[in-house]
Amino acid sequence: MRNSLLLSAAFLIGGSGAGFANEALQGLIDDPAQWAIQTGDYKNQRYSELNQINKDNVGDLQVAWTFSTGVLRGHEGAPLVIGDIMYVHTPFPNIVYALDLSQDGKILWKYEPKQDPDVIPVMCCDTVYRGVAYANDTIFLHQADTTVVALDAKTGEVKWSAVNGEPAKGETNTATVLPVKDKVIVGISGGEFGVRGHVTAYNMETGEQEWRAYSMGPDSDTLMDPENTTHLGEPVGVDSGTATWEGDQWKIGGGTTWGWYSYDPELDLIYYGTGNPSTWNPAQRPGDNRWSMTIMARDPDDGMAKWLYQMTPHDEWDYDGVNEMILTEQEVDGETRKLLTHPDRNGLAYTLDRETGELLVAAKYDPAVNWTTGVDMDPSSDTYGRPAVVAEYSTEQNGEDVNSTGICPAALGTKDQQPSAYSPKTGLFYIPTNHVCMDYEPFRVSYTAGQPYVGATLSMYPAPGSHGGMGNFVAWDNINGEIKWSIPEQFSVWSGALATAGDVVFYGTLEGYLKAIDSETGDELYSFKTPSGIIGNVMTYEHDGKQYVGILSGIGGWAGIGLAAGLTDPTAGLGAVGGYAALSDYTALGGQLTVFALPD
Amino acid sequence: MTKCTILSAGLTCALTVLAQTATAEEKKDWSSDPNVAVAYEEGGRYYTEDDVPTYFINDEGKVDWLTYSGFRRYHSECHVCHGPDGEGSSYAPALKKSALNMDYYDFVAVVVNGRENVGASQQSVMPSFGTNPNVMCYLDDIYVYLKARGTGAVDRGRPAKKVGKSDAIQEAEDACMG
């Protein structure tokens, strides 16, 4: 069998040293029988070449086997499959199970870290965890309390551990890590606690810290070169990470790094985005607040920033810039270019040249987006690359203690971290979205280490004047900046999508449905209600010649908190009960993996 | 489209369920409940006969300042775990019930000190807010707002009409926030 031969070869290389880990991991990623990395591949495409399950037979899909994780909280991310072993993670307490796929998922080993439960309430919006990473015969677990642990993939024994942050200051983790070359790239959460975001590289073999790049601060902290690091083609200048802040606010400035990372081995650059500036009250932090809300391209060897693009200068709405950075090679004006596509929380999807950071497209991927009229695309303009803010929806211009109403999208963003998929066959991006708007009233807050540092009152509701649901599943053309089609959903779509060579796209819903749709038309081909709401990401693998599709259920996360009781409609008038569906009427807590296959 | 039909059906269904819940909650008359009824006012704050803070809604339907302020503070400090409008979430319990079922002093103690409920099937941890002025300076505000939510005196969403902030409340706020 071709796939097993490839795999053995990969393991052999993997055993020969850390320097080759990247090539070994790349080999596993290139083998569609494996699901070796949370993002599907280094490009974050979430596309599989497997086509045994295709648009003609996906309607016959059946549940092949299931696995209870024993944990009730929100289950984000997905299992990995390396050879005969599936690695399943859980939210806090961050258990890792190694399941033997040759023995009906028998538990080969289980690792449960001891963590101080005091980290739980410091995690804004549930104790989610977006999954383990694999490289060099090692599983990398990044715990809620920011401890990074390297586990022997065969035995579960601890090889090393490193502490990345201080939960007592509000530093926590929800994200996966990215193994690149001989390093593991690690982010941090805590933007709602005044954490100053950073990205850190640890040595894959020893766990030693190799570099750390902060999102704001002097150049020695941000790892920027005033001359050679560029923003939209221009040098950033000296200490750009403090120059647009007043006083010491940058020290508690946010810009956390809890999203998805991608990597281009040819350019040797990693890509990721930074989160919201702290606090949510924009009046307390005058200036552009660089480099919050920024797409970053860095050298994985020393962390130096090559180029940046700040999407939302001086955020006024909590539109974190951490969503996935999807790398593609596509034709633009007759020329094949290396692109980076990023559907941002602010409701704009950006297409950039990932070599230079040149901005090519910035367009709304939900028509409801109203806080901006669009981005200035004229390189000769003083406001080049900046979004034009609509005064009515500006919480800065309306001021403190004023309730700005009808802002779209809500702080959840047009999408949050739930990752999109890209099919090279259709050239389309499949984007899970929220269709929710908000009222936002900022007010003055004081900072206490380890305490929430928010400073705004929010109420959210489904986008007015639309289909009444709180989500859409959108097919996006990143070259023309156009929505190809859009499927209305009753709730936000909070599940990562998967596209396959079988011309099928999969995603989950908050009610708990796993859905399969036609990648060209969006027509629904299959739907199955799993035991709990889905905020996990769909994955696929092949074992003994058979293709499987896996999804974690387990309602929770921001979606479970915001939508459990349903949303109210502020336009419904006095005394009206919430006019929209409550998620708690559809689903309840429970972590479970469901694996699907075609009947024999 | 079939999708839209399914969607509409789902919405209709949900509305029915919500309406039934609302009817069930309206049965109890809270106005004479000693933990709710206003005994006296002091500088724009309202108290029960046991000197416990409570909400007040005047003849014009205006909520007192603390209730309005509590709505704002709740939706800044509490709702990211406990969900909108005190309704609870997949992560933490519905506080609109806690404000009615718990003794005021117990409520304060939990907010100040936190609470842990960690076991095999549950990992709930309420943090200690004792050092957080954004919570501690508005504790009564949040409490009376949740009480008003619990009795149904205040609907979901932002209270539409309110009485302005009294000088006494402003002075206390300035002193507390520093």
Image (spheres, rainbow, N blue to C red):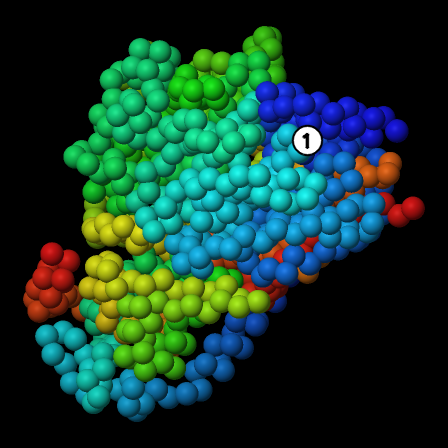
Label 1 sits on residue:
A47
Relative side of B111 to B9, left or right: left
Q: Is residue A414 above or below residue B56?
A: above
Image coords of residue A574 (percent x, y) = 36, 67
Q: Nearer the viewer, residue A432 or A240?
A: A240
Image coords of residue B48 (percent x, y) = 22, 86
Judged from this view, the residue extending furthest toward the top is A335
Relative side of B6 to A302, left or right: right
Residue at 57%, 13% (x, y): give it: A266
Residue at 60%, 11% (x, y): give it: A336
Query: Dot 1, crowdedness within 10 Å: few (<14), some or many (≥20)?
Result: many
Image coords of residue B90 (percent x, y) = 51, 62
Query: Which quadrant of the view contains residue A255?
Result: top left
Q: Name the kind of residue labelled 1 in the image.
A: Tyr
Image coords of residue A42 (percent x, y) = 60, 26
Identify the chain of the residue marked 1, using the numbered disc in the image: A
Residue at 36%, 39% (x, y): give it: A276
Relative side of A521 to A267, left or right: right
Residue at 25%, 35% (x, y): give it: A250
Q: Nearer the viewer, residue A510 or A74?
A: A74
